[in-house]
Amino acid sequence: MMPQSRSELTKSRVRSAWLFLTPTLVLLFVVAGWPLVRTISFSLTDANLSNLQGAQWVGLENFKLLFEDDDWWISVKNTLFFTFISVFFETILGLMIALVLNTKFKGRGLVRMAVLVPWAIPTIVSARMWGWMFHDVYGVFNYMLQSVGVLSKPLAWTADPDLALFTVIIVDVWKTTPFMSLLMLAGLQMLPQECYEAARVDGIHPIRVFFKITLPLLKPAIVVAVIFRTLDAVRVFDLIYVLTSGSQDTMSMSVYARQQLFDFQNIGLGSAASTLLFLMIASFTIVYMSFSGLNKERD
Amino acid sequence: MTLPNQQELAMRIQIFFLLMLCSLSFFELSSHATSGNKGYDVSIACDSLGKKKEQCVASVKRFEDKTGLKAKVIEAPTGSSNRLAWVLQQLASKSSDIDVYQIDTTWAGLLKDHLMPLSEHISKEQTDLYHQTLIQNNTIDGHLLALPWYVDIGLLIYRKDLLEKYQKDVPKTWDALAETAEYIQQKEREAGNKKIWGYVFTAKAFEGLTCNVIEFIHSNANQAIIGNDGTVRVNTPENAEMFEKVKGWINKITPKGVLNYAEEDSRGVFQSGNAVFVRHWPYVISLAEADESPLKGKIGVAPLPAGKAPGSQSVSTLGGWQLGISKYSKRKENALKLIKFLTSPEELKERALSGSYYPPMLSLYEDTKVQDALPYWQKFLEAFQNIVARPSAQAKSKYNQVSSNIWNTAHSIFIGRKNAEGALKNLEKKLKPLVKKNQ
């Protein structure tokens, strides 16, 4: 083959690749890129919702105000606490459920579908439902726990500052564990069966099999699931807004940003809060991708 | 050089879909832009939920029948804070699509740059028909920006049957309320009604808490948080005492859950028979007296209790909705006709009869038909004489921040995180720069 025609073919392939990608890139830019640029530019101004055109450049003033605001730091703390605890429990429970779903039993297909129901119900609906169940006077949890004797007095699950964030975490774990279990189930089903056959022949205890074979082989899937879930958890909004809303004990960064943007009409400060949240997620993603990129090359 | 056929086809399909999407969205946008001039003479954005929406549509229909003008009712988002954000976006873009806006009691100050002043168009005779606090609440920098449409005020709703059972009078002071509530709660719990509480209100960290706080403060010593001249005064010994008193009720006669109760939660506790007293808005009365309600025939209504400092009296926070005209409307004449009709004595009476909307005009309460249509109208009128507005006219565009500071302070005191004196001192410090920026 002549070298020239090969590079011609490559060039045409590259060109068609770009042509294919362009419509999608345009759409992405319009829907995601442009609003992001606008948000970042608003964060550098003192824009107000009732007068967007009159916004003046203030540089990093909004960021400085954020760093001085106690409520912002409380919301950061709430968000990180929520993220770590909920992702931790979702991973453990998700793994357990995935292991169960991986074994063959009658009705497995149905159970797999049923497990997805919490994830499928819109968050607003399930948050309202859980809000009623957790109600301190006519909620069913207080009723059940009191009649069994575990509680002597009803608890104010969503109002008590010590309990409220845990209540939100409980609801989130219920809702998102199916998602985690599904990701890990997919990983489990791709594991090579030879290792397990060899372990069975050697008569190794199942628990050792889990820790020495399953867990190390499943690590990439677990890492992917944890990363996806963490990025999502940092942006938590609807659960907190519907279940508790407004109170400092449970306010997350997204709830704080919304309050600044729409309740206080402070577009500048709210955009700065949103930008910081975006930067946190972006840096996390970049760190992860560079790590996994390095791993790939070593393999 | 040509592309392979399959790839070319796939790409053409992709571009076609993208173009379809773009053209569809352009169609949508352009229809919105030109719809302002088609087919109707005035537009209004009012209540958009259930019965309230039906009644707004009915009122507008009566306007159409009377004047022959065609009016369009535009759907606004539900939920007060969502609606405010939407209204602000419409006004900030100087849209002429909507002429008349139904605005919440506290929004006149927030929207002052966007509403048309009404003073030259509404006669003094007419404004005198309304309770003067309502007019003052809607007057910013000397301009009347909205007319009152219907009012909501805070009321004390109680279990008449329980008070009779234990031979207790309706309490006139907060201390008497606490005492009666505690007594009845204890007796009822001993008799087996384990879940009952004495006094329930809305203490979730939102605007509803600010309404309760205004009543707590003003009923004890009538000192405005923000004066008309902009002075901020909230760190007083009377206020600290009142806050500590209410905090003492939590977990004693008030369930701890109130700290996350919005309107429907506290109503639910009362209506299911689990509260002796509740502070609430008038809509609860008709729901509690409905045929399906377990409390039918068992409730009573009274003005809220007063404090014990000198000069204390019962007060009620002013709620309800007003009607204003957008500055950017191209049909101001028609808009004026619409709001004059909607706030006229005849229409207000009609709305009282068909929807139990409490009219903002005092004279209407002397009409026997209106009296029959509004449950407990005498008690309402008694409380209506002593209404107090939230400091929205003084805080103007910063009202939401002022209110959120007030409710956060109250919430942190009631939840036990801060003591009243320190929290109130902090609140004053936070409010002063907010109000000063406005003057």
Image: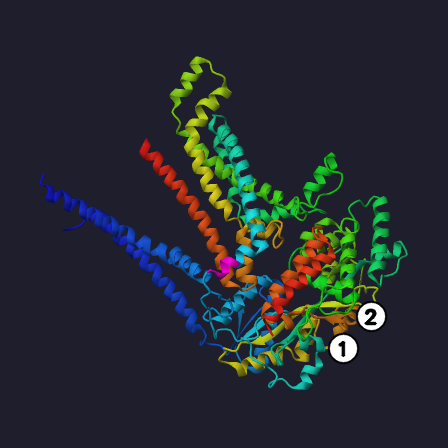
Quarter assignment of residue B337: bottom right
The amino acid marked with disc number 2 is Gly
**Residue B295, labelled with which disc?**
none
The amino acid marked with disc number 1 is Asp
Q: Which residues are magenta?
A: A60-64
**Quick check: B12 left or right of B215?**
left
Q: Decide which of A104, A276 is in the foreground and name it.
A: A276
Q: Position of residue A251 (x, y in %)?
A: 58, 51
Q: Of the residues under marks 1 and 2, which one precedes in the sequence?
A: 2
The relative height of residue B222 versus residue B409 in the rendered view (above or below) is below
Helix, strand or loop at label 1? It is: loop
The residue wearing badge 2 is B311
Disc tally is 2
The residue wearing badge 1 is B367
Q: Residue furthest top?
A: A202
Q: What chain does mark 1 sit on?
A: B
